Image: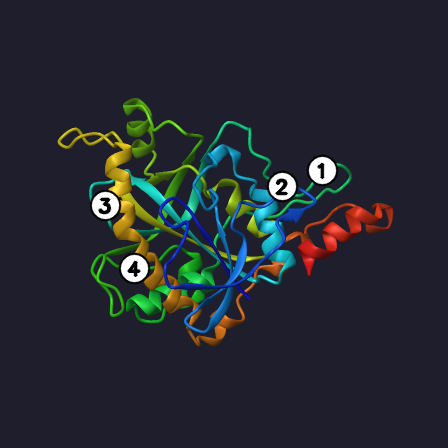
Amino acid sequence: MWAIIGGSGFEKFEDFKPIEDLSRETPFGLTSLGFKKVSLEGKELLFIPRHGTDHGVLPSEVNYRANIYALKKYGATKLLTFSAVGSLQNQYAPGDLVIPSQYVDRTKGKRLATYCGNGIVGHVSLAEPISTTMLMALKNIVGEQEISSSAALEHDLPEVTAPGAHFDFKVHFEKTLVVMEGPQFSTKAESHLYRSWGADIIGMTSYPEYALAREAGLAFLNCCFVTDYDCWKDDIPHVTVEQVIQVMKKNNQKAYQVAKNMIHSQDPKLLAATEKDNGLKNALMSDPTQMTPQQKELVAVLTQ
């Protein structure tokens, strides 16, 4: 089953038809407000607005563990997320879609970022934190020719810098996202530092979502819509909340187009996409016979 997590500007999609409100309760506390099953033009999926339906939760306050766990418990195998981000490079303009394949975590240790601990020990690889299958499917939807998986793993995928067959906005693939703590925006020195590292975009919520999705064995792809140029670009006004909100409204319908094309795709590889074998299923070091009933239940959900 597909699942979508919507970030700032993506708390709701007018064309999603609600089917059922789902229980927010998990062993890790409550999910974000608004967890439900919805229909997207006839296809059922799970949906969580990351910051709640009223955008009342800061990036550092999101209960990431509860959100991912609940999606997994209700049968999700593929997770498509939408985020608002700042651009660190001139070529990624407000309104563009940027797909990161790599992340740099610059949060400050406040976020609970693993399902391990308290008697459960496991180590998953985050070398390739996104689903190559989902990436390739989106590239094909945009209009790319099919490319081999080996080329994708070697970061040899060409970039799309012009509108594709299905979209009227620019899409950029294989980029690097810096995750900052927030809620404040960057200082100019920080913004220039991240640019010197070769980072492409900056946001506040992708970590620990991608890490938890991998532990839970979910195929994961993060779609980031640019709202601003952070604060490094001095020939335009620096980022403001008013500016971000204006661009976010325009990006919402673009995100819907991406979701509709991905979720209605009949690509057999995409339909079967999962990261189950790369999650905790094959990464646990603890002896299951020594776990408590509660721990066994938790592991059973995450590895199913």
Q: With 144 as the anchor, is 112 left or right in this view?
A: right
**Between marks 3 and 2, how big is the CA–CA gap?**
33 Å
Q: Are marks 3 and 1 in contact (CB under 8 Å)?
A: no
**Between marks 3 and 4, how big is the CA–CA gap?**
21 Å
Residue wearing tag 2: 114
**Between marks 2 and 4, how big is the CA–CA gap?**
33 Å
**Between marks 2 and 1, how big is the CA–CA gap?**
8 Å
Q: From the image, state whether disc 1 or disc 4 is nearer to you.
A: 1
Q: Residues within 10 Å of mark 4 (few under 14, many from 20)?
A: some
Is tag 1's residue or tag 4's residue first in the polypeptide sequence? Answer: 1
Is tag 3's residue or tag 4's residue first in the polypeptide sequence? Answer: 3
Q: Position of residue 49 (x, y in %)?
A: 47, 49
Q: Which mark is residue 117?
A: 1
| Residue type for callout 2 | Thr
| Residue type for callout 3 | Pro
Residue wearing tag 3: 94
Q: Are marks 2 and 1 in contact (CB under 8 Å)?
A: yes
Q: Quadrant of residue 205?
A: top left
Q: Which mark is residue 158?
A: 4
